[in-house]
Every structure is written in C-alpha cells, then in structure tokens.
Image: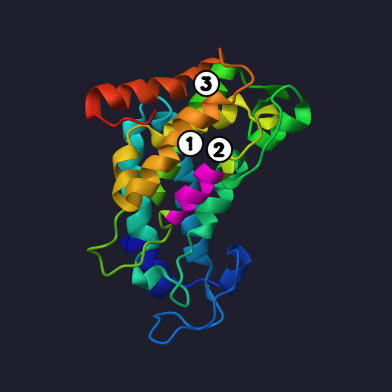
Amino acid sequence: MGILKESLTSVPSVSIDPSMFMVSKPEPKEGATHNGDQLPALLIFLLNQLSKSVIAQFIDEAGVSTAAADPVGILVASVFSQKDLLWRGKPLIDILMAKMRVVCPVLFGLRGSEKTEEGRARLGWKRINGNWIDDQTHNTRMTGLGAGYAAISLRDFSNSQMENPWPPFHYWQTMASIVSTPPDQASPTQYNVLKAMIDRYEGRFLQFYGSAGRAALRVALVDFPGRALDEKNAAVGSLKVLVDKYERDQGLVLR
C-alpha cells in the first residue's frame, strides 16, 4: 500500500487521464483527494500490475482451493477503497475488472458454445501454442475466477468509512445474467463459474439479500440446472449437489 501511495507523491512520473481506464468518467466530487484531470501514470501502472497478480492468484490457487480466494478478495477491497487512491471519489477497480472480463467473460454476461472456435473464445478458453487448453485446466481456471469474483463482490462495508469498490449488486447482476441463459445456449463454463461463485459464499449472499437471496439461490441451484439439456453433465450435477449439501449441513431447503 505504501508503494502505491508513494507513486502519488514521492516518485515522479508523467500524468495521464485516468478515464481511459474506467467505464465512465466521473465528475469532480467535493472533498475528493484527487479532483483534477490527471493522475500519475505510475499509479495506473502499479494498479495494473496488481490486477495481473490478483488474477494469477485466483487462477493458480483458488482454482485448486476456492478458500484461497478470500484473502485476495480482502486485499482487492482494501486497496481499491483507499481514499488516497480514488479519482474524483471513485475507485479505479475498472482496471481489474477489465482484465477479469477478458479471462472470464461469463461473469459479465457473455455466452458461447464450447463446440465452436468462436464460442470458446467468447467463453474465455485459453490457447497455448495455438491449441486450446484441456477441459480440466479450463475448468480449474474458471473455478478460481468465479470464486475470486465472489470474494471481491461480497464484502461487507457496513461498518467501514470506506466506499465498497465493487458492491454486492454486481454479484447479483452476474448471477442473473448466467441463470437467465436459455437452455440451448447454456455452457458447462457457466455452470462451473456459477458453482464457484456460490459454494462457500452462500452465507454472505444471504446476509446481503435475505429472502430474495434464498429465492435467487433456488433459481441458480434448482431451476437453472433443472432446465439443462444435458442433465448428466458433471458441471450441471455439481450445482445439484450443492442443494443436498446445504439442506444436510445447514438446514437450508431450496427445493
């Protein structure tokens, strides 16, 4: 954190327009630390490098054990909510989310068929030396990124003076975009990402959304996989397993 703040004051660098790295350009905000038209390029560079490391951590560690995503999510929330690192009162987390969209497009509503070249590209499949990675490697990547997204977006800032840089409504929007997919357009990638987003994070989701969250979980874990054209697919089955798990371990009945 100290290095990031030093990039604002101690280490000289050229200044650039931060709006190039944001979805929308915020207007100046009264009382904001940085209200000008530019920020040091070094800060943007460091946040970009941090974002790359965060995604690598999600893929390499959270893909194997989704519990590893949570400490990284805490780091992301902490860094991007720092008042000294906001521009016109808005976080620069779009730098990270732009990269998340590239590696895991289904988090942002994109769909595709895994049976076609174009579809795989739309779903975030990775190529190595011109060849698609195997199914297991792809599923591990998507699991880590799905869990990582939940770890970022389901953070409770109710007792913090900081503003949540990626509030829970983004999680809701992502879940809605996946479960609203018509059965003939649904993909194993979506099922895997959805499972990773929910497993271990259902409690936080319910804390934020209560009975509405419970209804959403029923749609995600019962209705959505129930409409699948290939019910024997392992990714579809993994969602159904969660329903039994929650009923057995938590008394959470979704059916």
Q: Position of residue 171 (x, y in %)?
A: 46, 48
Q: Which residues fall within the magenta stretch?
A: 169-176
Q: Position of residue 249 (x, y in %)?
A: 23, 24
The Cα–Cα distance between marks 1 and 2, rounded to whole angstroms, is 7 Å
Q: Residue at x 24, y 29 (%)?
A: 251
The reply to whether callout 1 and callout 2 are in contact (CB within 8 Å) is yes
Return the residue at label 1.
219
Which residue is outermost to the bottom? Answer: 30
- Give neighbour class at mark 3: few <14, some 14-19, many 20+ (Cα, 10 Å): many
Return the residue at label 3.
235
Which of label 1 and label 2 is nearer to you?
Answer: 1
User: Where, quadrant-wise, is the C terminus in this rendering?
Assistant: top left
The reply to whether callout 3 and callout 2 are in contact (CB within 8 Å) is no
Please, what is the three-letter code of the amino acid marked with disc 2? Answer: Val
- Give neighbour class at mark 2: few <14, some 14-19, many 20+ (Cα, 10 Å): many
Q: Label for residue 252? A: none
Element class at badge 2: helix
Return the residue at label 2.
179
- Quadrant position of residue 106: top right
